[in-house]
Every structure is written in structure tokens, then in C-alpha cells.
Amino acid sequence: MRRSINIWNGIDKITILLFLVMVIIGWFNIYAAVYNEDHKGILDLSQRYGKQFVWILATFVLAVFVVIIDNRFYLFFAWIIYAILIFLLILLLLFGKEINGAKSWFEFGPLSLQPSEFAKFGTALALASYLNNRRQELTKLKVILPAVAIILLPAILTELQPDLGSTIVFFSFFLVLFREGMSPFVFISGLLMVLLFFLTLLINNLYLEAGLIVIAFFLAWFETRKFKLYLIGFGISILIGAGLYLLDHYLIKSLGNELVLLITLIMSGLAFAYYIYVKKAIAIFFIYLFLLGSILYINSVDYAFNHILEPHQRDRVEIMLGFKTDTHGTGYNVNQSIISIGSGGFKGKGYLQGTQTKFKFVPAQSTDFIFCTVGEEWGFLGSFVVIGLYLFLLLRLVFLAERQRSAFSKIYGYGVISILFTHFFINIGMAIGLLPVIGIPLPFFSYGGSSLWGFTILLFIFLRLDASRTEYLV
């Protein structure tokens, strides 16, 4: 009995209270989202709100079970849990039930489970276990590569289903690597890749590449402060580029301006290779690699966009960027969600009074678009409260993570924060039209047993570790 009392005394009551409030508010919003006049009882098991009540009851039992397990279990069995969940993702590709073109579910009679939701806490445990003794060495490639492999393995298996939303969520673990000492250059490079992806779709490639070259020359001058050397480099590049352009224009006639620009860049780099080697101009070398890599990446974006993304995913990106409008097709969900949220005004229409909700104008309004129900019925004030709850929870988890004495617990805590933040940011971004629709739930709000259980296990493992933060795990 004494151990149970110690756990209760040590567990963070504020986080548990936030969890309970969010789960209950989410349940009432699911009731509003799929309200049925013929089935008004909120405990009616034939309706989604009745089923969600069962999931919630099971969730409370699951949370207690997670908390009463010895905290050392999660460290010692982290790899086994990760391996089991990876195995389930592999089995899913063979025996999973296909719904809406994706094999993301195991079906056991009336019960369906989505392994990718559970793989998130499994990956967080494995990553925390691996980094437990290596977090100070994340500047070394031999340490970074296995950490990246831990993240990419479930991400790739999830994408094969295909489930782009969950795949993107796994990449949020790179925030943990950055927090634990990975070079900011890698993190910033990732952000720049995302930025370049959208800029490539918005701006003519030739203009974008020319702009990057100008920026690279400016950075090179800022680094060397040698005006003569700067002029020589600029002159060599102009001569090579002009020569190639004339050669292509009058003789070859098949390269094109973008390929001429890329070859010019490569030949200019070769011309300065000796200077970089002799002067050990590492900064200039990295500027050159960044420029070359960026231009190669820009040229690959068109292929990836047109051949890797599914047609409906391309449509969603194009609608988000304003290239096309399709209020009755691909863009219907987002358009109706925006109308629904906007119609709520400042105070909202009142609980169960949402017309967009009542007449089912928004598809998936109890799952991916649950936030539109909040916006319509509770207005700006209700939306502000819900967003405030999430921000308060995230800040509270940051506080808990920072007070951990165990590196394993701290790293796992930041894994929890990264997952919850990514879901929160993307889901609400989808609902208000700022991000393309990729189909991920809002934690503790959206309908579904797998997502609710997955988030609960994810959170309560951390609360269990925090409850024993004064103990050494090893």
C-alpha cells in the first residue's frame, strides 16, 4: 500500500486535471458533432458519443494500470515495446483492414485498433532509451544515424499503409534530437527544406535559384570580407554561366536555363576547390554545399510533388496555396469547416445549436474536424479556452520535463510534448485552412478509441516517470 500512496503523492495533479477536463469537453463536443434527434441519450451505445463513453471508461482504467506499473519497467522494456509495435505495423500491411484506401486498422469484430497511434509512445520510449547515455554525443554521425533510424522505421511503415498524417507526426521526434544536442544546422536545414518546398511551388524555379545564388554570394562576402576575392569568384561564375548559355543556345539547344545554372554552379565550385582546400575555408565550403543542395532539392520538388504525393494530397496543397478552388470537391471539408468556425462569431451559437453541425455539412466533424464544432457552438471565446488548455498542458509538460533527474524521463517527456504539439498545431491548422488536410486527430477531443488510448498511454507513462523523479532508474 505504501508504494501506491507514494505514487499518488508524487503524480502531477494539475496535468491529470487538465487531461480530465479535455477528455470530458471532447466527449460533449462529439455528442454535439453527431447529435441525433432519435438517439438523444448521451450514453446511447448505438451512437458515437455512447461508444466514446466506453472508450473513456476504458481509458481511465488504462491510465491507472500505466501508473501502477513500476517506473523501471518503461526503461528496461522500452526496446521490447518498440519491437512489438513495429511488428504490428508490419503485420498491418499484410492483414490490416483497408478503409478509405489505407490499411491502418486491425479489426476484431466490433473493435478496431490503429497500431500507428500506439507506435508513437513506443518510438518515444525507444528514442529515450537510446539517447539516455548518448545525448551529449549527438554531434557525431554514428550516434545521430541510429537515432534517425528509430524515427524513420515506424514513419516508413506508416507511410506504406499509406497514412501521411501519422508519418509526419513521427518526424516531430526530430525536435527531441534538437533539444538533446543535435546541431541546430540540421534542424534549421529541415525547416528550410519545408520552406523551399512551398517556395518552389509558388515561385518560378529559375528566379528562386537565382535568388539563392545572390544570398550565397552575400554570405560568402560577409564571411571573407575580401572584396577582390569576391569579385574574382563572381566574375568566374559569370564567365562560366555565359559560356554555357551561349553553347546551349546556339549548339546543344537541349540543356535549358535551370540545368545551365546547375552546371555553372558545379564548375564554379571546382574552380574554387583549391582555394577552399589551401585556405581551409570551411565556412565557404558549407555555404557552397548549402547552395548546391538547395538547388538540387528545388529541382527534385516538382518530381516529388507530381509523382510521390497522391492526387488528393496535391489538390489539398494547391487549394491551401490558392492555386485552385474546389469548394465542392477536395476543398469541401476545409471550406465548410471555415464557414462553421466563422459562423460562431464571438460567443458562439450555443451548445447543440450549430446549424453546420446539425445538418452534417462538415465531414469527419467528430474526428479530424472536431474543432469546427467548438468554433461554431462556443465561438471565439470557446476556441480561445480550448487552445488555452492545450498551451497550458504543453507548458506544464515542459516544466515537468525540465525537473527530471533521469535523462531517460526527460527525453521521453520531450517526446510526449513533441507529439502532442504536432497533433494540436496541425489539426487546428487544418480546421482553419492554414495547413493542408492530412487527417490527424485532436488529442483527447476527437472521436476514436485508438487515438484516445494512444495519447493516454503516452501521457501517463510520463506522469508515472515524473511521480518517481527522485528515484534513479538505473
Image: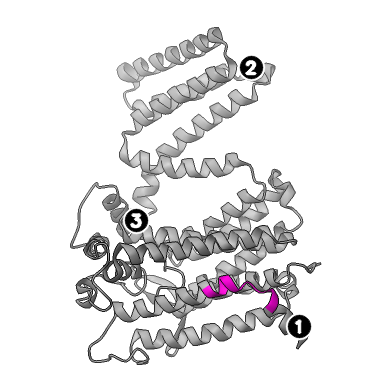
Are the two marked residues, 1 and 3, in contact with CB atoms closer than 8 angstroms?
Answer: no
* SS class, disc 2: helix
Q: Is residue 6 above or below residue 45?
A: above
* SS class, disc 3: loop
Select label 2 or label 3 by which is in front.
3
For residue 326, side relative to residue 140 (left or right): left
* SS class, disc 1: helix
Residue at (35, 84) in percent of width and height: 48
Q: Earlier in the sequence, mark 2 or mark 3?
A: 2
Locate residue 315: give its quadrant.
Answer: bottom left
Question: Residue 10 lies in magenta, yes or no?
Answer: yes
Where does residue 6 sit, x and y in percent of width and height?
73, 79
Locate residue 199: give its quadrant.
Answer: top left
Where does residue 340 sit, x and y in percent of width and height?
24, 66
Where does label 2 land, which residue? Answer: 274
Where does label 1 land, which residue? Answer: 3
Marks 2/1: CA distance?
68 Å
For residue 440, side relative to residue 314 (left or right): right
Q: Earlier in the sequence, mark 1 or mark 3?
A: 1
Start-end of magenta stretch: 9-17
Q: Is residue 444 above or below residue 263?
A: below
Where does residue 358 sit, x and y in percent of width and height?
22, 77
Q: Is residue 209 at all visible to an observer of this figure?
A: yes
Select label 1 or label 3 by which is in front.
1
Locate residue 424: give its quadrant.
Answer: bottom left
Residue at (63, 19) in percent of width and height: 276
